Image (spheres, helix red, strand yellow):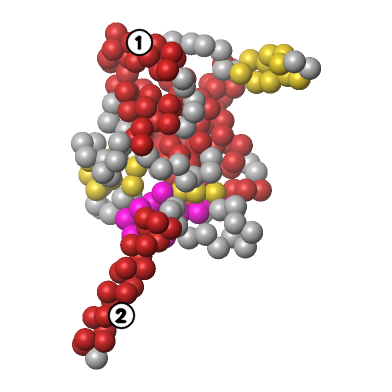
């Protein structure tokens, strides 16, 4: 079945106000889209400006850097379009890698290429008596994908990989790292998908009683 991508309406809320429930920055990028199991993907990433808004939401960018990248994107619209297309492609590759028992080699290669690019860009700097890995300031529009790829790779190689779950909500397809003690979490957000599922079960029981 061919999936149609809706890049106009998203899922009803702007990317800058989306709930952060994934527990990992790579999961939060995955969660900029929903409805993957249906015929239409609902996508919050419509433009490069949306990607910058998402980066602000998850704490990757402050106002000054956001303004600079928006300016660079405006001056380089073709590159901005290429970058948002790449962001969507990486996002869907990450989704499939974590939800498929045997991921496609192409998805692993896409994640690996972006992680390798990111690793080249990172620098070691001294911070007090410690050393930290940092991302030097850059005008590269694709820089917002680098921490995502690194985080997704680290999660994939860690024991927490088995804790990555897909929301059980109908038509959701958001991912999250289940850090509950007994690994019983089922929903991206109990207030949203969890309550809707409860409402559907209640309605089904009511119909059953009426038809019984």
| Residue neighbourhood size for the residue with mark 1, other residues' Cα within 10 Å, grouped as few (<14), some (14–19), many (≥20) | some
Instruction: Look at the numbered disc 2 and give the secondary structure of its residue.
Output: helix
Magenta stretch: dominant secondary structure:
loop
Residue 82 coordinates in the image, percent (x, y): 33, 22
Queried whether the magenta region covers residue 167, the answer comes back as: yes
- Compared across the picture, whether 86 is left or right of 150 comes to left
- Mark 2 vs mark 1: in front: 2
Q: Position of residue 17 (x, y in %)?
A: 36, 36
102 vs 203: above or below? above
- Find the magenta span and give its range: 162-174
Measuring 28% from the left and 44% from the top, which residue is drawn there? 11
Q: Which residue is drawn at 75% across and 15% down?
A: 128
Q: Could you tell me how far apart the alpha carbons at marks 2 and 1 are, in whole angstroms?
A: 55 Å
Residue located at (60% from left, 52% from top): 179
| Percent x, y of residue 126 | 72, 14
Which of the two labelled residues, at mark 2 and mark 1, occupies the earlier sequence position? 1
On screen, residue 79 versus residue 103, left or right, reads: left
Q: Where is residue 150 in the image (x, y as percent from the top left)?
A: 56, 30
Q: Is residue 23 above or below residue 109?
A: below
Helix, strand or loop status at disc 1: helix
Q: Can residue 72 be seen in this view?
A: yes
Check residue 176 for magenta coloring: no
Choose between 110 and 195: the one closer to the eye: 195
In the picture of the structure, the residue carrying the numbered disc 2 is 205
Please tell me the numbered disc located at residue 72: 1
Q: Residue 49 carries which label?
A: none
Position of the C terminus, as image quadrant, is bottom left
Task: Sort mark 2 into few (<14), some (14-19) or many (20+) by Cα contacts within 10 Å.
Answer: few
197 or 191, nearer to the observer: 191
Residue that sits furthest to the bottom in the current view: 212
Q: Is residue 143 left or right of residue 198?
A: right
Q: In the visual, does 191 lie left or right of 183?
A: left
């Amino acid at each position: 079945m061919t999936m149609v991508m809706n890049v106009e309406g998203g899922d009803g809320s702007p990317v800058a106000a989306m709930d952060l429930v994934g527990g990992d920055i790579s999961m939060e990028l995955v969660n900029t889209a929903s409805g993957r199991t249906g015929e239409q993907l609902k996508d919050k990433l419509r433009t490069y400006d949306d990607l910058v808004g998402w980066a602000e939401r998850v704490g990757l960018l402050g106002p000054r850097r956001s303004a600079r990248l928006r300016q660079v994107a405006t001056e380089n619209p073709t590159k901005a379009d290429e970058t948002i297309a790449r962001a969507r492609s990486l996002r869907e590759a990450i989704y499939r890698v974590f939800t498929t028992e045997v991921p496609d080699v192409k998805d692993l290669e896409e994640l690996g290429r972006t992680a390798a690019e990111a690793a080249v860009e990172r620098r070691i700097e001294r911070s007090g008596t410690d050393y930290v890995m940092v991302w030097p300031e850059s005008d590269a529009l694709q820089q917002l994908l680098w921490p995502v790829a690194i985080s997704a790779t680290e999660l994939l190689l860690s024991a927490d990989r088995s804790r990555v779950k897909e929301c059980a909500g109908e038509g959701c397809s958001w991912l999250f790292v289940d850090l509950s003690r007994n690994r019983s979490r089922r929903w991206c957000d109990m207030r949203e998908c969890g309550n809707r599922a409860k409402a559907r079960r209640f309605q089904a029981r009511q119909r059953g009683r009426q038809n019984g």
